[in-house]
Image (cartoon, coloured by chain):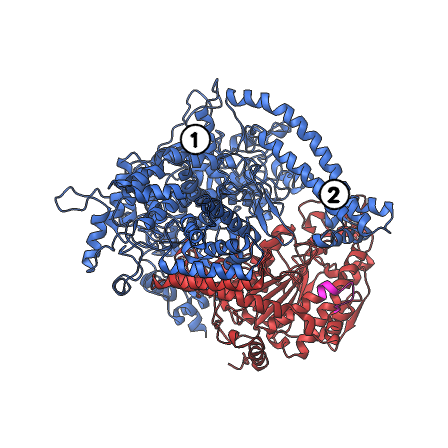
Amino acid sequence: MSDFPTLQTSRRDFFARTSDGLMGAALTHLLSSDFFGGQSALGSDVSVPLDLKSRQGHHPARAKSVIQLFMNGGPSQMDLFDPKPVLNRMDGKPFPGNVEEIGNQSTAGIGVMMGGQYNFSRHGQSGMWMADVLPHTAKMADDICLINSMWTDHPNHDNALYKIHSGRLFMGYPTLGAWTVYGLGSENQNLPAYVVLNDELGLPKNGTRNWTSGFLPPTFQGTRLRPTGSPILNLKPQFEQPSAVTESARGLLNRLDEIHKKDRPYQPELDARIETYGLAARMQLSAGEALDIGREKPHTLEMYGVGESTTDSYGRRCLLARRLVERGVRFVQIFLEEQPWDSHVDLGPNHRAICERTDKPVAGLLRDLKQRGLLDSTLVIWGGEFGRTPTTQKSGDVYTGRDHNMQAFTSWMAGGGIKGGLSYGQTDEFGHAVVENPVSVHDFHATILHQLGLHHEKLYFNRSGLEERLTGIEPPRVVKEILA
Amino acid sequence: MEAKDSELVFETVIAPILKAHCVDCHNPEKQKGELDLTTAKNFLRGGESGPVVEPGDPEHSRLFELVHRGEMPKKGGPLSELQVETIREWIVAGAEFREAPKVTENLPTQHDVIPVMLLRCTVCHGPGQQQGELDLRTPVAMKKGGKSGPALVAGNPDESLLIQRIESEACPPREKLLSVFVKRPPSAEVKLLRDWILAGAPEVETAPDVATTEPDTLVSEEDRLHWAFVVPQRTPRATNSPINVDEFVGAGLQKAGLDFSPEADRDTLIRRAYLDLVGMPPSVEEWKKWRERKNSDWYAAMIDHLLASPHYGERWGRYWLDLAGYADSEGGISADPVRTVAWKYRDYVIQAFNEDKPYDRFLLEQLAGDELLDWKKADVITDEMVENLTATGFLRMGIDQTGSRTMNFVPERLGVIGDAIDVLGSGVMGLTMECVRCHTHKYDPIPQRDYYRLKAIFQGAFDEHDWMSFKTRTLQVATPEQRKRHAEVNPPLEAELKSLESERKRADVERQMTILREHYPEQSAEENQETLVALKKADNQRTQTQAILVKKFVTADLLPDAEQPKAVLAARQALVDIENRMIRVRSEMEPPFAIRALWDRGHPSPTYILRRGDHDKPGRLVGPGVPSALTDGRTPFEVDPPFPDGTASTGRRLAFARWLTRPDHPLTARVMVNRIWYHHFGRGLVRTLENFGVKGEPPTHPGLLDWLAVEFVDHGWSVKEMHRVIMNSRTYRQSSRISDRHLAVDPQNRLLSRMSMRRMDAEALHDSLLFVAGKLDDSTGGPPDPVSVDRNGLVSVNRTLKGGWRRSVYAQYRRTEIPTMMETFDYPEMGPNCYERSISTVSPQSLFLMNNDHVRELAAAMAARIEETVVGDGESAPDSGAKVEAAYHLALSRPPSEEERRLGRETFIQLQREWEGSMTGPLEAYCHTLLNSAAFLYID
């Protein structure tokens, strides 16, 4: 037991109660929830119920929610987190090994070794290395655990994205977020359990498949909340109608459905359906309230960079993420448009620009969560689908960027029972491949599930005779060394 | 210490455990997983996945892994913790034997080498091309060699060109690795080649593992007795045996002390039958016709009328498309390339259902249409040949990324083949096959070998070592008539399209420039030009300057319409106008000849079992065959090339299809009648539609299932006849009301004591909304209706040129762009297919029906229709009661109840008061509500 101290939940419980109070009595006793009637469609053999009611995991949890800051495109580990003096010295020289070992399918257009693009220094009491393009994140170093020894199995974006999100190289499998809410449900029945905050400038590479529920019921897929306009698709009427008419129409619908139901006793589906209209109405209120950052204090907004042109968009989403987990949302993902980290060209200025967009908001999020006592129970994850090569790559006529590298990359975690100030794992002297304490994507997932109180082996879904798991068939390893 | 260690030997600690818990299944007679654990020697030999222990490494030892996870033993529960620990300790200590059995190290043979050649070499030195005049497919050809001499010198690897080329990395050549999708052989493979050559390149005579007249060692007689593997039993013609659906169902009810529910009222039956058979409610005229008909046979006549409707095939064909995993795109990669002619298969299916094509013929065409007629050598291509080839699209529906630049390696190809086998297994055979790809089925008597025999069936067409990607795997086959029409109609339209395309490009540039000029007047012409250049580049290829320019552009472009200058809106409209003209021209064109088919190419590579499903772990050679449990186990599978004097074709799929459609096949008819039953009742007689195996649910009414299966075959595999048999029954015509007694005795309706109430599926809802609104464009077939994606990600189907929308089956279903409404109401992700849709009841559905503007638009159209009909009836202003009445007739095919009528009128008056000044608003809001109601969405 002592391995799993119980969560400090009082603050959030208190908030949830007051929030209900603020929203009026109507919300207080509304029980869930969306209903999933087609269990027969799924075979009887599932490990947990198919709804979104909050439930216990397999063991005591260290984290209640996850915020995943997904860095699509593949940030460069040797430029940001994993300094390589030897590589810097070799700048401009040819790759010393066989170019096929670089690990990409094509060996055409491979340039020479490229030293790190930015200066590094040590930060925090732990002396964690971080590049000077991440000044704000660096201040939070003692809360962060860098995993420098991540590796994956495919050098293409599409497949590596499927892998990092769903544990498989192909489309159609449930993502980490979907598995999480399948396993744990949600603590707030008036908001989606699994929320995606995508960039206004566009969807990430692979689009909505980054948050699909795959073969799990659609109840478990990610729901996009838009920071502007109608937060959920069709949340508000898309046509003009006096509000009194809307009210009367809703009243009529209730009456009609009651008449229908009265004549058809014992049909739980009809009840469930009526309830979905109730939930839809509550969601209109709750989502509006959750997304309204107007009541945040000015210094909070400043901390996230809201209001500054470079950081405003990402800062708003980081702030929303906090507001959502505060309200019991289980899993929040923030994406950037397309794949901005994919710097085949102009890596130096391009990476710097994305750091400028995200660094302050990310640090603001960590600091804010910590101040509010939420970091203990919120696991924050930062990282992309793979890393980058130590060599440059020809693109057009220039050699100014790095290619994809599946053999090593850095992700970091903070909060949720993760040991802060730790730099875990080692890469070789070029940052090209892992040499110590490798962490596979399955290990990564198993560790996240572990912190949420879920056991990767016990969390399964039976699909046409196959027990499907996020972490596949070969047993993964929970990276115990990074747990606090 | 010493003494204890010495006791830790196989004979003392392991053998007793095996004897007590394992040898029931793993013995010489019943080699489950091809594993015999009765002797130390066979223990060491291992099973289909290779050795079961890795000395010193329990984590990588199958034995430990499986008992540790509790997956073994299957019978008698998991081993005790102590036993598991003992096994672990024994492995850690080196897996020692007191007397190590002599395992003769098998020398490698050509069957170890050929898989390596296939994987690494034959793409340049094989069936397609023989570079350097070298063919490496057989030892004979290897020894013969090419221009540079023999590929190998038996007994001398160092002197062998094969080894030299590989070790110097001259082969496979670096610059070609990616273009031919080959990876270098790892050192273990090179060592294997060396060992084989060193041993003198021995060849052994090995016949492929196929069914023979000898009893099968891997599948027992007992295994064959599972109910679904036994031929359906014809009901004995005894005096008191059931002779129709109701007698079977009635017997079950009687036993439980229940009786049939009363027959549903006529309005309910009409609506039920229409939605069931054609997926839309009746028109008011048709509804009135049936409800007023005096003849007692009105019901049977209505069923016949519906079965003759062309809308029937659109409804029931769609079910089959789910089963096939129909999609209009390849999937797999983010570009999600569109399958431009997949629709031909969709039309084939719809037509087959409308024609009531016998189900055995339907399967024959889909599984082996290419082997029915020799189209390659035909003087004239006939309609039948085109139809046969189109039908084989059934096997081409899975996700296929093999046309991409980087995803066409053998594992991806095996994925395509695996999908085809899964679709066939889960959809047609009622067997889950996916797991057998890697290991013998955990529950069903399907050894891994049987999966690879099935794979060999497909090898003539789907050969992972001689692959055609989706880009090349199409046929250009057309009848003379098609060619003639094409030549007449298309050339002028193509010319028009070409000029429209350049207009479109200009208009697009103009749109971009207008946005820049209007939003950033200060930006220089050079910067504007640079923006246009940058927009054409992928985002990861832009310089920092370009990235900034693009971001500026996109930010402006994404502003809502209300914030856009008029000039921008005009420029956008100009572009849309041109695009619409292009759509119109395209719609007038004759379709291309391309057929997305599967055809045998006549020279399959040998098929090897892949241990644990790994493409580079070949096991033994197998030949084509069918799952042994479905046969008597001692009859060889006969294959004859279909065109002995014509085109080379293996005939394997044809032989398979003929076996599958034998009248006495234990599964084929049962699985299909169960599916038909499922669509009528919302639940199969066998609940697990895709799994008739040991882990599937047994039938609730086994006698009825078999009776239906026999009837089906006796009636020439006619699907429409099955509808008649089922729908005319008393069982089907029951009311769906649940009584207290039902709840107590038959809560899940397993006994069919009533009809099941059901929610409309996505198609029925979509099509019914259109139909009720009078917005259904009922033209059929042809290329799918394009969809648009708005900036919020809402995917909607475009209006047709007639101003309405076609039935949902004709929309474009790109995997990444499923129309939002369909997805919201459980249109499935095809992975690879969908044998049963889930039915969710979630709030996005309510939000969609309440707030979506398309639904509102349809409600408004429905209101307009009501205004028309009601006004047409009299001189004076119609009262709201008449409108309420008309709305019920139109949407629900019944009159309102007294309460509903009163409620409708009251609300209507209230709405008029609340929406003063709006002529149409109140009735629109009323209709919109009705379309949201449970009465509309649920079918009694």
Circle 2: element type: helix
Residue B696, given in percent of the width and then of the height, sits at 34, 54
Viewer-nearest residue: B433 or A54: A54
Query: On what subunit does the disc labeled 1 rest?
Result: B
If the image is split into quadrants, where does the C terminus of chain B sit? bottom left
Instruction: Based on the picture, tell me whether residue B27 belongs to the magenta stretch.
Output: no
**Chain letter for blue?**
B
Tell me, yes or no, if residue A231 can be seen here. Answer: yes
Q: For this view, does A332 lie left or right of residue B291?
A: right
Tag 2 subunit: B
Q: According to the image, label 1 marks what residue?
A: B369
Label 2 with label 1: CB-CB less than 8 Å? no
Q: Which chain is red?
A: A
| Part of the protein shown in magenta | A305-315
x and y percentages locating residue B851 in the rendered image? 55, 57
Q: Quadrant of residue B652?
A: top left
- Residue beneath the point at 61% across and 70% down: A289
Residue A269: horizontal and vertical position, in percent? 40, 61
Q: Amino acid at mark 2?
A: Ala
Spot the residue most to the left.
Answer: B239
Q: Residue at x 39, y 36 (%)?
A: B309
Q: Amino acid at mark 1?
A: Gly
Going from N to C along the chain, the mark reached first, 2 or 1, is 1
Pointer 2 residue:
B571
Q: Position of residue B434 (x, y in %)?
A: 44, 49
Q: Does A105 appear above or below A301? A: above
Left or right? Give the position of A352 relative to B490: right
Q: Which mark is residue A205?
A: none
